[in-house]
Image (tube, rainbow, N blue to C red):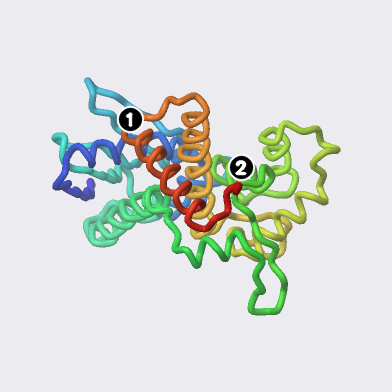
Amino acid sequence: MEVSRTQVFTRPLRGREFFEQIIRENLDLGRPDRVQLIFGRRVYRNTPSRFATRIIQAGVQPNVHLTYKHSGVKQYFKENRALRTETTINNPHDFGVRKDLSNWPYLHKLGALINTRLLETEHVGQDCLLSAESFARVTEPTTTETGQRAPGLRFGQPRVMALFAGLSRFLPALNGFANADLRETMQTLLNVTPDQYTAGQMSYDLRRLRLKGLITRIEGSHRYVLTTYGRRVAYLMTKLQNRIFNVASVAVQTAALPSRLTRAFQQLDAELEQLVAAAQLGPA
């Protein structure tokens, strides 16, 4: 059985750009934890399957393939104007049902849900903007409903940005991640030794993330999972840092800005100078 969903773009070029961004930012979709989320089935160490994200390019048309047991989901940009998502169920036993036709409605509904879960997972990374109020709640100290003080995660601080980057690229194990797992990633991102970023510091950062609603603790354990809201925040902060502020900073220092941006910055400087002069803040 194949269950597909086709979404046609009124601006095909933008659609192609969107799909290429999806490929770049979701190369971990084939990992067991993501497969179990998309297919809605538990994945164990002995689950027979090929867990990997396969990018197959025929000519200039890349296809994304994910596999669960004998079944799978494929996504590609069809006829240069439509995003097509296809779930193919080759063996109903993969999902605990028999092969008789009475199970056809259930399998059809299951295939549609798999397509939806994949699109929702990809949507988080593409639509990660926050309102001004939400941005402030993350970056400024707040108080939870239970009266606990949640320290702010200030944008631009190296330790905070390493946290967001770690959560963006961190590939959690099947049962979430622990202090030691994320701490090792943090030490690498900050380029510090284990005694310079300790387990205690990681515990403090995990508490900040939890009180802000970015991660949640798995009940009965000391392991955590990233919430949908947390993934949205981590993606946004990391994209802002890496794709805007870092790029703009280097461009300004090296005078490598495109002409329109150069003129805009020059106009901004001129307006600020006029504002300072009008406020009589300059030297007499």
| Residue 29 screen position, x and y as percent | 44, 41
Residue under pointer 2: 166
Residue shown at the point (51%, 54%) measured from the top left: 233
- Up the image or down, 43 lies above or below 74; here it is below
Residue shown at the point (40%, 29%) measured from the top left: 257
Asked which secondary structure carries label 2, the reply is: helix
Residue shown at the point (42%, 43%) measured from the top left: 270
Q: State the residue in front, 85 or 235.
A: 235
Distance from disc 1 to disc 2, alpha carbons, whole Å, reads 35 Å
Q: Tell me which amino acid carries mark 2.
A: Gly
| Any part of residue 207 in sight | yes
- Up the image or down, 100 lies above or below 131; here it is above
Q: Tell me which amino acid carries mark 1.
A: Ser
**Nearest to N terminus: mark 1 or mark 2:** 2
Comparing marks 1 and 2, which lies closer to the viewer? 1
| Residue 227 screen position, x and y as percent | 54, 59
Judged from this view, the residue extending furthest toward the top is 59
Please indicate whether residue 111 sits to the left or right of residue 154 in the image: left
Judged from this view, the residue extending furthest toward the front is 284
| Residue 148 screen position, x and y as percent | 72, 74
Asked which secondary structure carries label 1, the reply is: helix
Q: State the residue in front, 130 or 114.
A: 130
- Check disc 2: other Cα within 10 Å, few if <14, some if 14-19, many if 20+: many
Residue under pointer 1: 259
